[in-house]
Amino acid sequence: MDPNRYEVNLSILFTELDVLDRPAAAKAAGFDAVEFWWPFPEAVPADRDVDRFVQAVEDAGVSLVGLNFFAGDMPAGDRGVLSNPDRAGEFADNVDVVVGIGERLGCRAFNALYGNRIDGVDPAAQDQVATESLLRASKAVSRIDGAVLIEPVSGMPAYPLKTAADAIAVIDRVRAAGGDDNLRLLFDIYHLVVNGDDPDAALDAHAASIGHVQIADAPGRNEPGTGEIDFDRFFTKLDAAGYRGHVGLEYKPSGASADSFGWIKR
């Protein structure tokens, strides 16, 4: 794997720093590209807060290559709002803000976390709301030639997308409803392994649908080399499958963030 293809998720790494100081820290650690979960507490932040975020990325001299849509209160257990009938309006309001940041910073990959199942709400009703939300997002990011990423997630029993096939089913459903051909699988090997999905089989079946890749070792979600995943083998298979995009480092560093990159063969 070309080390220049690695980029750092600054919502899980360098969290010892203020959000706006993290892009410069990633640059100092040798990275030219970064990604973020939604970096604001609300779906529609103040313009000045968006400007400060954009400025921090630009001043650091790094590229933003991945950004999440607003996903609710992640520390409190939210994993997206787009399938929640009571909160899909927040997602709709967030879409234009996300596209605006993407347009300013050249980011073209946007992760839309699906949202947890809600007690007392028919899953089919949630799926219908999700389809409408993702249609809106698909059409909006197509204006800047962007892609909407759909991600299987572990560690949250109420989150319904556990496997690559689960995510592909959502992509197919949105396309069938008239979505643009810009929904892609976010292939996070950590989540797939923890959920018991077979990453080799998922790669074989869905390589053409992958829009972005993220990594962490399992178990533990720390940097490669701390768990049981054979990353040399995975990267070889990823290259053979034709994936040429960035690989996001979305792991919890076992020590200081700046000390967690020794596994990279530079």
Image (cartoon, rainbow, N blue to C red):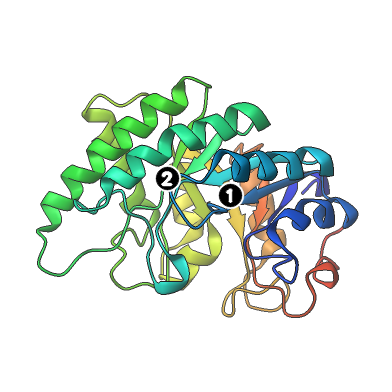
Residue type at mark 1 is Val
The C terminus is located in which quarter? bottom right
Kindly identify the residue that appears in the image at 74 percent across and 65 percent down: 14
Spot occupied by residue 127 in the image (x, y as percentages of width and height): 19, 48
Residue type at mark 2 is Ala
Is 12 or 178 nearer to us in this picture?
Answer: 12
Kindly identify the residue that appears in the image at 62 percent across and 34 percent down: 107
- The answer to whether residue 71 is left or right of residue 172 is right
Position of 68 relative to 123 (above/below): above
Is 56 or 174 nearer to us in this picture?
Answer: 56
Spot occupied by residue 217 in the image (x, y as percentages of width and height): 63, 71
- The answer to whether residue 26 is left or right of residue 69 is right
Position of 156 relative to 43 (above/below): below
**Label 2 vs 1, first from the N-terminus:** 2
Q: Which mark is residue 96?
A: none
As helix, strand or loop, the secondary structure at mark 2 comes to helix
Asked if disc 2 and disc 1 are in contact, CB closer than 8 Å, the reply is: no
Position of 191 relative to 155 (above/below): above
Residue closest to the far top: 143
Q: Does residue 103 appear in this view?
A: yes
The CA span between labels 2 and 1 is 15 Å
Q: Does residue 208 appear in this view?
A: no
User: Mark 2 highlights which residue?
Assistant: 205
As helix, strand or loop, the secondary structure at mark 1 comes to strand
Looking at the rendering, which quadrant does residue 60 occupy? top right
Q: Which mark is residue 213?
A: 1
Is 39 or 238 nearer to us in this picture?
Answer: 39
Spot occupied by residue 41 in the image (x, y as percentages of width and height): 49, 58
